[in-house]
Amino acid sequence: MTSTLNSLLETFARIGATPDGGVCRLTGTSEDGQARALLAAEISGRQLALHVDPIGNMFGIASLAPSSKDAVVVGSHLDSQPTGGRFDGVYGVLAGLLAIEAVAARAAVEPGKARRNLALANWTNEEGARFQPSLTGSSVFAGTLALDDALALADGTGVTLGEALTAIGYRGTADLTLEPRRYVELHVEQGPLLEEEGVEIGVVTGCWAARKLSLVFHGEPSHTGPTRMARRRDALRAAARAIELHHCLIELSRTGAHASAARITVSPNSPNVTPSRVQVWFEFRHEDAAIARGLGDRFLAETRAAVASLGVDVEVAADEQRGTAALDPHGAALTASVARDLGFSLMEMKTIAGHDALALNKCVPASLIFVPSRDGLSHNPAEFTDETSLDKGLAVLTEVIWRLVTEE
Ligand SMILES: [Zn+2]
């Protein structure tokens, strides 16, 4: 028998489906609009009040305690990477919807128990694939990113997030009027630890630090034929040297850091012109913020030295340092006790990936719960979590939010 959760996940996976079994649902595209419309119908169909705020965050409110202004917010995101899987984000939104439905039904047969309301959230542009930075909607909600700045973010073709949201009809005016008191997010792990340890539920207690460096290599355009080799100032060659240096530095440091150089732009990008401007996005992640910062410093110094002989200048276009953070200890303890009560194995862990819960944690105590990812694979069409594991996560989420809305 197919569960409601599974059939909802299958329905959503058809929106923006890619031939290889994944999804591509970039923020503000028609696919995003279709997924939002379907979610709006699911919200309204469950008698939840639909709100869409000015950055396009969608809320579905269950008034369990009408005399209270307080809400427990549960959510995640419907947008995806270009090579997205069927579970990243959408699992947390749909499980949140079903958990709220179950808690509302229980509150109806146990009147007077609920002391707070519940709100489902679909946060705009979590992935940051089309518009950077990521975690846009949740950061605006948390007050760490100005609404006007967020609406002005432009994609690679100059279309702004505000224009894209207007085009799909999700630049709203209805803020969440309730006061968020706790935030809970259920997500697939996107890494290998739970599967390797054979554990069913991950209780996330905090996050790794990250340093994101975007470097521009400035050379000089010249003809790729007649220009003497010694005369060339090749920005792409300098970038290639920096990328390899970056990987070697991580291997040799033996710090356990994770690092990537995953995006590059080349100008003028003609086969017959020596590249004169190349931008590369580098990142370093580590559990210890000082190590992430130190690796970045060393990388910058070594890169400058390594490319100097090529006649190429290095400009630091962006240097973003995200520190470690601790998530809500009360929520983590509650999640652990719920998992134990339901008979599931659990482990405490840190998240290496960014999540809306981390953005929300700046304004409200936030919790993050993981279920295993097969092979630790994510941002990949083959991303997979089996139905039993998904259902266990839903069971934990449901009981956690029941306790959060009813506790003293
Ligand atoms: Zn996600």
Image (cartoon, rainbow, N blue to C red):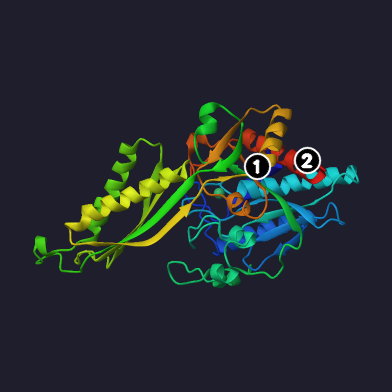
In this rendered view, identify the residue nearer to me: 214 or 167.
214
Residue 341 x/y as whole percent: 74, 29
Q: Name the residue under label 1.
A: 6
> Which of the numbered marks, if any, corresponds to residue 106?
none
| Number of marks | 2
Of the two numbered discs 1 and 2 in the rendering, the one whose residue sits closer to the viewer? 2
**Residue denoted by label 2:** 403
Mark 1 vs mark 2: which is more N-terminal?
Answer: 1
Q: Is residue 287 left or right of residue 272?
A: right
Image location of residue 101, percent across then percent down: 77, 47
Inter-mark Cα distance, 1 to 2: 25 Å
Residue drawn at (67%, 69%) of the image = 172
User: Which element type, helix, strand or loop, lies under badge 2?
Assistant: helix
Callout 1 touching callout 2 (CB < 8 Å): no
Instruction: Report helix, strand or loop for mark 1.
Output: helix
Quadrant for the C terminus in the image: top right
